[in-house]
Image (cartoon, grey):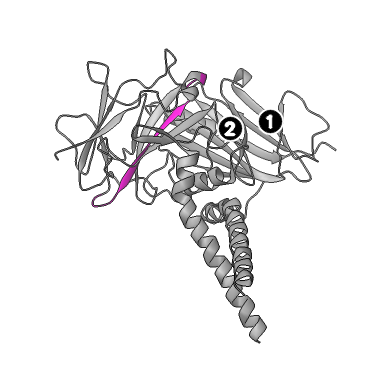
Amino acid sequence: MLIIRKYIIYTLIIIVIAAIFTYVSIPIYKNIVTVRNDIWTSIPSAGDPKRSIYTRAYVSTHGLFALSKPESVYFSSEIDIEEAALDGSSCYVLSGTEIQSASIIPRWWSLTVYNNDGYLVESTEKQYSYNSENIIYNSNGEFEIYLAGKPSNNISNWLKTPSEELFSVILRVYQPGEEFFSNLSRVDLPIIKKVSC
Amino acid sequence: MIKGYFKKSLILVILGFVLHLFFINYFHVGMLWVFDRATGANESVNTVLLRTDTANSDTRGLKRPSSDIMYSICTYDVKYKPLIITSSIPDSYWSISFYSDNTDNFVTLNDHDIENNYLKIYLAGVNSEPKKVSNGTVVVSPTDTGYALVRMFVGNGEDLQNLKDIQETLNCIEYNDS
């Protein structure tokens, strides 16, 4: 009986140690598997069969079926340019120019807002994202998306954010070309700036 | 005495680390379990499981879905027989991606890779390669089971009905070539 109790205690200790390793490793492996580009992070080839077990686990938590290079790359942002968490109780402007590297323009791209659970934000307008074909550009060739609970009078593109909840933005870029993949940490990407509501 | 405790502690830490690696290595299994139950993938194989409209705020099962894509999914088991996957292809972005049972994306073909706007793929397992192949591409899955995921970009939504019609042409059926 004593021996059984002893092994149960050992097993529990092993489980606790495994849980501690997992908890500690999450922020560490996030930094290892992702590439940072200003406010954005990406995984160079998220669905690649040669990826590490940590990359596979990290991708699993963010969306199971990721594509690999050269088909697509995903950028994720949970912060604004002041490095503050994106918060549904605030308002933001996401602004950028055509997403490209050198002269190669990707096949298409899209920007999507997700709530804290990783699902699309409830919206009566059913506008959950903008892509390279339906976004409205300004006369100077740039685009802006207003990220807030209510639309803006000045900015045509609006994505509803979840009220009183943290949120994230994902930029998907399809078939961006080899050079884009070689410069994931340097390509020009949109910025997200907090503004008064 | 101290040496004994140190040795025991070290063994427990090593076993804890091994358990941690095991957990990380099989983390996707839990996520797939949730996905399979949400979509019915656990009950349906070698057929088109889903033909979805673009994702909305009610979409569950898959985290961070794209609302710019219409998805279709075929779950497959090619242990004994290959599968034939056929579909019409639109003039806009379209791709089919194959995922092994651990969610690794081992092959992706897009509309630029496919001739005459018509897809014909023989999807086989390592031990179930087709004996007769006509006018198609052979894709060999590294695992007996997995997922084939079709993505269609909806763009500005003007061609939505045509894309829905094309989505209906997707077929995944077992291939009997013996």
Residue at the far right in the pictured view = B178
Q: Which residue is mark 1?
A: B121
Residue type highlighted by circle 1? Ile
Residue labelled with disc 2: B96
SS class of the residue under badge 2?
strand
Residue A177 forms part of the magenta stretch: yes
Q: Is residue B144 visible?
A: yes
Secondary structure under the numbered disc 1 in the rendered image: strand
Image-based side of B129 in relation to B108, left or right: right
Nearer to us in this view, A104 or B118: A104
Q: Point out residue B14 in the picture as x, y percentages from the top left corner.
A: 62, 60
Residue B76 seen anywhere in this rendered image of the structure: no
- At label 2, the amino acid type is Ile
Residue drawn 27% across and 51% down? A165
B57 part of magenta stretch: no
Q: Which residues are magenta?
A: A163-178
